[in-house]
Amino acid sequence: MLGITFALFLLIAPLFDIVVSATDLFFVIALGVLSGGWTGGFIGIQTENYQIKSFHNKLEAGYYLIMVDVERSQMHLVQELMKSKHPEAKLSVKDSSVVIPSHQPKAIKS
């Protein structure tokens, strides 16, 4: 965003009577995008995932975390499967982090 803003500034208010070409604008925008992505990547690497943060101590102790993404209507199937295959497993959280109203996935037939 900063690259686009700076490029538009150069286009509207040229500094020192320098004419800015479309190629120059492209490179300024590309530099802004690349530096923003690079900085954001470093911040992301240093930040623990908000969904996993509450399980940090258990994961450090050697426990396993299984995250399953299913429709709410099929959650009982996953719970029954986990109870039959791994009765020692504990359901810790029922949560949805992303809601896509236009998404209509096909139902899994058992």
Image: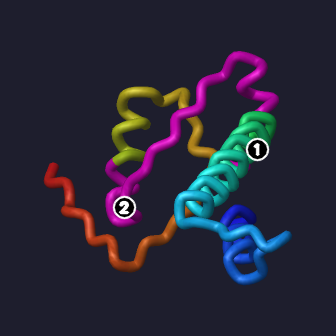
Residue 29 appearing in the image: yes
- In front here: 90 or 21? 21
Give coordinates of residue 53: x percent, y percent. Answer: 76, 42
54 left or right, relative to 51: right
Q: Which mark is residue 39?
A: 1
Colour scheme of the rendered structure: rainbow
Give coordinates of residue 85: x percent, y percent. Answer: 37, 27
34 left or right, relative to 89: right
Question: Which span is picked out in magenta?
Answer: 50-77
Q: Is residue 97 above or below residue 30?
A: below
Give coordinates of residue 37: x percent, y percent. Answer: 66, 47
User: Farthest residue in the right direction?
Assistant: 16
Q: Residue at x 38, y 54 (%)?
A: 70
Amino acid at the residue labelled 1:
Thr
Image quadrant where residue 96 sits: bottom right
Q: Residue at x 75, y 28 (%)?
A: 58
Say which element carries label 2: loop
User: Farthest residue in the bottom direction?
Assistant: 12
For marks 1 and 2 on the same chain, the one whose residue lies earlier in the sequence:
1
Is 10 one of the magenta-colored residues? no
Say which element carries label 1: helix
Residue carrying label 2: 71
Give coordinates of residue 98: x percent, y percent. Answer: 52, 64
Q: Is residue 3 above or below residue 66?
A: below
- Nearest to the eye among marks 1 and 2: give it: 1
Q: Residue at x 54, y 58 (%)?
A: 23
Image quadrant where residue 18 sits: bottom right
Label 2 neighbour load within 10 Å: few <14, some 14-19, many 20+? some
User: Farthest residue in the left direction?
Assistant: 109
Label 1 neighbour load within 10 Å: few <14, some 14-19, many 20+? few
Is 74 one of the magenta-colored residues? yes
